[in-house]
Image (spheres, helix red, strand yellow):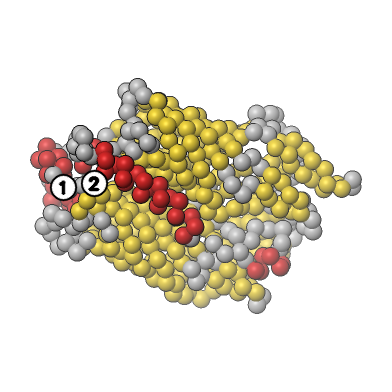
Amino acid sequence: MSKYLTPLLFLIGTLNLTAQKATLTPKKQRLDFAKMYFEIGGTFLPSFDGKIANNEGIQTFSNPASAIQYLNWGGFHFWGHGEFFVSFPLSYQTFKKEAINSSEILHSVATGFRYYPKVYREKSIIPYVGLNWSALEFNQTINSEEEQPSLAKDFILAADAGILYGYKGFALRIGVNYLPKTKWAYPISKFQKAEIKTPNFGFQLGLLYAWDSTKDTKEENITKWNSFPTVSKQSLGSTTFGDFFIGVGPSISFSLDKSTFNQTEFPYLQDQLASSNYFDLVAGYNFNKAGLFTTLSFRNPTFETEGYGTKQTIKKQSFTFEINKFLIDYSGFTPYLGINIAYDQLKYIEEVDGIQRELSFDKKMEPGITFGWDIQPGKNQEALILRTNLRWFPFSDFEVDGKKFNFSQLEYNLIQVVFYPGRLKNRK
């Protein structure tokens, strides 16, 4: 997993140095650190060739140019030098009427970071570069049938670059996206595969609206929160032992290992699965003075792959207990690291040519690691915060017919809303 995190950490380190220089002149206030935004737009992909098998061998056909519409939720951080965002794909459309043979490229929810050498401000053209990660799915529809399988590439690290032009809270984004690993060994039949190359580059156009979510904070809190050092302990200024919280947020899971079972029994199905979107529900306790928190979470992701008369479904129910320690507070950006233990139950459902079987696996304990960050301008005085985290379960697997189904999981919990009812009561 380090090969994906190293470039991102390098960018954040570069941003950190830039932000430190920026704090010299003029002084940057803590509550100016972040600004939230929503964005609507589209990513446009050029045409490419698909492939089919017929009596004459392998033939090619042309797929038209297409667009993926998206909704982004994010924020400008580090006083305008950085941007964290989550991108939700809305629809996939082609610029040609539906044909007998067609292809579809689908993105899962993506998360990314962009670096701005110049501070984002209105009435200026601001360049940026960035990285984002997501899963990519590709499938073909031949002769208007719905039976062709979908293949996915999990946890793709992609790059983008572009410019923003802002005016009165709005900003226009023009950018280019680069996707690696766009060659697919696609099963054009149960027994034959062909290489298909989807586009490496996409062109992005979006419109966003940004605002400062801390402007309605009480004047005494503004003064106090701005007095916190740029770098400090997350627990600085805490006067209470702790607080209970509840939270919810959208999530997605990736299988980091390939399934030996699928590679041998169903080579025309996806051998490395990603889940559909689901919600992560949490309850926990924040130990304010200690700078750590515990949570109990529940998730129920579903993983599916199908094609050529075969459908495979894996349903997971998991309760996880974790302990996390805040590492530092950088003007409200508070990363943390922790350990967890999950109590899982897996159900495997397989349907081949109309014949179905179902296997349930005993509940088992799965240890893992958690990494994430909170956005906390007011430290432990805020009743509502935003949280993002990744949980890694490296030892998850099960067996079907004596063959291992590798299921090492990376759970990515997107922007989670965390609510502290006791803090809200104390503020009132």
Which residue sits at x=59%, y=47%? 180
Find residue 35 and report its image quarter: top left
Residue type indicated by callout 2: Ser
Residue 15 vs 400, above or below: the answer is above
| Residue ranking furthest to the right | 56
Which residue sits at x=67%, y=65%? 262
Which residue sits at x=65%, y=69%? 260
Residue sitting nearer the eye, 142 or 353? 142
| Residue 409 in view here | yes
Q: What whole-number distance in Å separates the C-alpha atoms at marks 2 and 1?
A: 8 Å
Between discs 2 and 1, the one toward the N terminus: 1
Residue 408 vs 37, above or below: the answer is below
Q: Quadrant of the C terminus?
A: top left
| Residue 283 in view here | no
Q: Residue 203's spot in the image, x, y percent?
A: 55, 32
Q: Residue 370's spot in the image, x, y percent?
A: 38, 62
In the image, 129: left or right of 349? left
Residue type indicated by callout 1: Phe
In the image, 277: left or right of 51? left
Which residue sits at x=42%, y=32%? 127
Find residue 240 and report its image quarter: bottom left
Residue sitting nearer the eye, 337 or 10? 10
Q: Residue 188's spot in the image, x, y percent?
A: 77, 51
Neighbour tally class for label 2: few under 14, some 14-19, many 20 plus, Cα within 10 Å: many
Q: Are marks 2 and 1 in contact (CB under 8 Å)?
A: yes
**Label 1 sits on residue:** 228
Neighbour tally class for label 1: few under 14, some 14-19, many 20 plus, Cα within 10 Å: many
**Label 2 sits on residue:** 331
